[in-house]
Image (cartoon, rainbow, N blue to C red):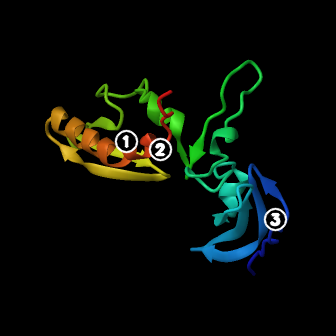
Amino acid sequence: MGHSRKKLELTGQRFGHLTVLGPAENIGTRTAWLCQCDCGRELVVKTIQLRNGHVKSCGAQCPLRKKVRKKKPGGVCSLTYIDGTCVEMLRANTVRKNNTSGVPGVEWRSCKGMWRASICFKGKRYYLGNYVKREDAVKARKLAEEWLIEPFLAQFEEPPV
């Protein structure tokens, strides 16, 4: 016989700048909640996004967004996640230790004898193709960054003083 799970009740609870107003229509198979941001906007958010802290406000255009980032003890800034994407990690554009190409999102696939280009953005991995030449894989990755990441990061640039 099937095992039923008790449904969470989040109405009235706060998650960052969001207050849960009540249940909303599921998003796919995921339970969702109607929330109100402290700025007054309403949005529907999946339970997992509330509970794991990835959604704390109504989004990038929220007037309270700048206040979401708080200094942790020791002066280290917390990370800012928007739709599951970490703004600071994208800006850093670091290369992992096990990277074989020196370029984020480009790796050597020895099983195919080719370079593979990919990019992760807002919780989704985009495969950009397999390439014989490393420079072609790098070019595909750079084009994807221009298309996906640069417009996203432009929203978070500080206006000139």
Which residue in the protein does label 2 denote?
155
- Residue 2, numbered label: none
Residue type at mark 2 is Gln
Residue type at mark 1 is Glu
- First in sequence, mark 2 or 3: give its number: 3
Q: Position of residue 7 (x, y in %)?
A: 80, 71
Which residue in the protein does label 1 denote?
150
Which numbered mark, 2 or 1, is in the foreground of this view? Answer: 2
Residue farthest to the top?
74
Give me the C-alpha separation between circle 2 and circle 3.
Answer: 31 Å
Q: Position of residue 54 (x, y in %)?
A: 64, 49
Element class at badge 2: loop
Residue type at mark 3 is Leu
Residue farthest to the left?
132
Residue at 74% over, 55% down: 38
- First in sequence, mark 2 or 1: give its number: 1
Asked which quadrant contains residue 25, the reply is bottom right
